[in-house]
Image: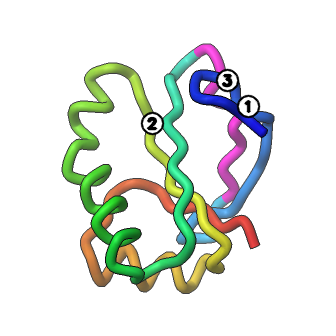
Amino acid sequence: MLNVGNAAPVFVLPDADMESVDLAGFRGRYNVVLFFYPRDDAPVCTQEATDFSDHEDEFARHDCLVFGISRDDCLKHAEFRDKHGISVRLLADE
């Protein structure tokens, strides 16, 4: 299990638009913030994703990219993103 501050293992996952996101491509260029949530459209998960989206500019000022990860598939992520105006990238780890 990872602890806060540990480097994440390298992975490649599809986002809501079915484009691959390769974590290795960001190493040394950006700070990456990963948040994990159980499922799209759950009230707390929705609040978490919209809060990260609302503060995305602040993260960008610190060279941070934010990604949300859940077990939901890409199509469900796209619906969730569009329904709630979520701007951070959502990755599918089915």
Q: Is residue 23 magenta?
A: yes
Q: Which residues are magenta?
A: 20-28
**Mark 3 or mark 2, which has the lower sequence index?**
3
> Which residue lies under the disc numbered 3?
6
Q: Helix, strand or loop at disc 1?
A: helix
Judged from the image, the secondary structure of the residue bearing numbered disc 3 is loop
In front: mark 1 or mark 3? 3
What residue sits right under mark 2 in the picture? 65
x 72%, y 57%: residue: 13
Q: Which comes before the other along the chain, label 1 or label 2?
A: 1
Q: Is residue 49 above or below residue 3?
A: below
Residue drawn at x 51%, y 23% as measured from the top left: 30
Crowdedness near tag 1: few (<14), some (14–19) or many (≥20) residues, C-alpha within 10 Å: few
**Position in image of residue 88 (x %, y %):** 39, 54
- How far is disc 1 from disc 3 in space, using C-alphas? 15 Å
> Mark 3 belongs to which amino acid?
Asn
Q: Residues within 10 Å of mark 2 (few under 14, many from 20)?
A: some
Would residue 16 be found to the left or right of residue 6 on screen? left
Drawn side of residue 92 relative to residue 50, left or right: right
Residue 19 forms part of the magenta stretch: no
Seen from the viewer's position, the closer of residues 22 and 59 is 59
Q: Is residue 62 above or below residue 26?
A: above
Give the distance between the C-alpha atoms of the residues marked 3 and 2, in whole angstroms. Answer: 16 Å
Circles 1 and 2, Cβ within 8 Å, touching? The answer is no
Amino acid type of the residue that numbered disc 1 sits on in the rendered structure: Ala
> In the rendered view of the protein, which quadrant contains the N terminus?
top right
- Mark pair 1, 2: CA separation: 13 Å
Q: What residue would you read off at disc 1?
A: 24
Q: Amino acid at mark 2?
A: Leu
